[in-house]
Amino acid sequence: MSDDYQPPEVWAFDDGHGGRFSAINRPTAGARTTTPLPRGEHALQLYSLATPNGVKATIMLEELLEAGHGDAEYDAWPIDISAGEQFGSGFVDINPNSKIPALVDWSEGTPLRVFESGSILLHLAERFGRFLPARGSARTETLNWLFWQVGSAPFIGGGFGHFYAYAPVKIKYAIDRYAMETKRLFDVADQRLGQTRYLAGDEYTIADIAAFPWLAPFVEGSIYGSAREFLSIAEYGHVARWVAEIAARPAVRRGRIVNKTSGPPETRLETRHCAADFAGKDV
């Protein structure tokens, strides 16, 4: 591989292309194994992992519980994406795209599947009437910033993160392209947060819940190795202020460790069924 790669007339899959996820990545969709999903006692069943996208769902659920919505209790089951568990038949049934997080809502008696992290946030916000204005310009502004994040995440994760941290070779053009875009997105957020307390205005909303898990690890230096220094993330002081405020919320502290499968025992909760599961955890 080199920077001067010339594409063939017709692309063909090469399972020896290398990279961290080469053992599971394929150009086809669908189930690869017959693997049913577990089900707990609550109406809300979450199947996820504590990646930035997965953490959106667990933060939202913990925020709803913190706000007094007892019927937001949920069971959270880990899906090991490195082992390909997202291609099990049970998971594919609820998300044909084989990406975490995925939610099954049994509150109406029949299972309602909700997949894609932005859709999960919107579904829960509307069901419980929290963290999303009901109407008018405030609702539209919240959805503007929610979909800003949803549309931007691939540039940060699959773009910058992949080529900077996971690609088997370092390609200058790819890293430069996505580093530029990631910094531009941080600048968008920083300029906005220089004007308002939260992304959509003065109120904490699903727009913040969506963006925080992606932006916070850069500020904290906990994602993609030396990415914080490489991208000069310290430049974005308004983002840092916003990250610190949200990170201190009790529900956020809990949500960030649910379905986390690595790190010291007190910093992870692989499977979650009730509030008591957080006993002894660093939250």
Image (tube, helix red, strand yellow):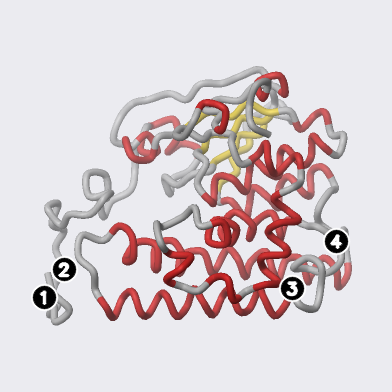
The tag on residue 203 is 4
Label 4 and label 2: CA atoms lie apart by 48 Å
Q: Nearer the viewer, mark 2 or mark 3?
A: 3
Compared with residue 163, is residue 121 higher up or lower down, i.e. above or below? above
Sequence-first tag of 2 and 3: 2
Give the residue at mark 1. 8
Give the residue at mark 2. 11
Give the residue at mark 3. 193
Contact between marks 1 and 4 (CB within 8 A): the answer is no
Q: Nearer the viewer, mark 4 or mark 3?
A: 3
Contact between marks 4 and 2 (CB within 8 A): the answer is no
The tag on residue 36 is none
Q: Position of residue 116 (x, y in %)?
A: 55, 51
> Which quarter shows the N terminus?
bottom left
Could you say whether the residue bearing mark 1 is in a helix, strand or loop? loop
Foreground residue among 188 and 87: 188
Please name the residue shown 45% across and 47% down the image: 99
Label 1 and label 2: CA atoms lie apart by 6 Å
Task: Name which residue type carries label 2.
Answer: Trp
Contact between marks 1 and 2 (CB within 8 A): the answer is yes
Q: Nearer the viewer, mark 4 or mark 2?
A: 4
Residue 68, quarter of picture: top right
Task: Name which residue type carries label 3.
Answer: Leu
Residue 33, quarter of picture: top left
Label 1 and label 4: CA atoms lie apart by 51 Å
Mark 1 closeness class: few <14, some 14–19, many ≥20 residues within 10 Å = few
Q: Position of residue 154 (x, y in %)?
A: 46, 65
Sequence-first tag of 4 and 2: 2
Task: Name which residue type carries label 4.
Answer: Glu
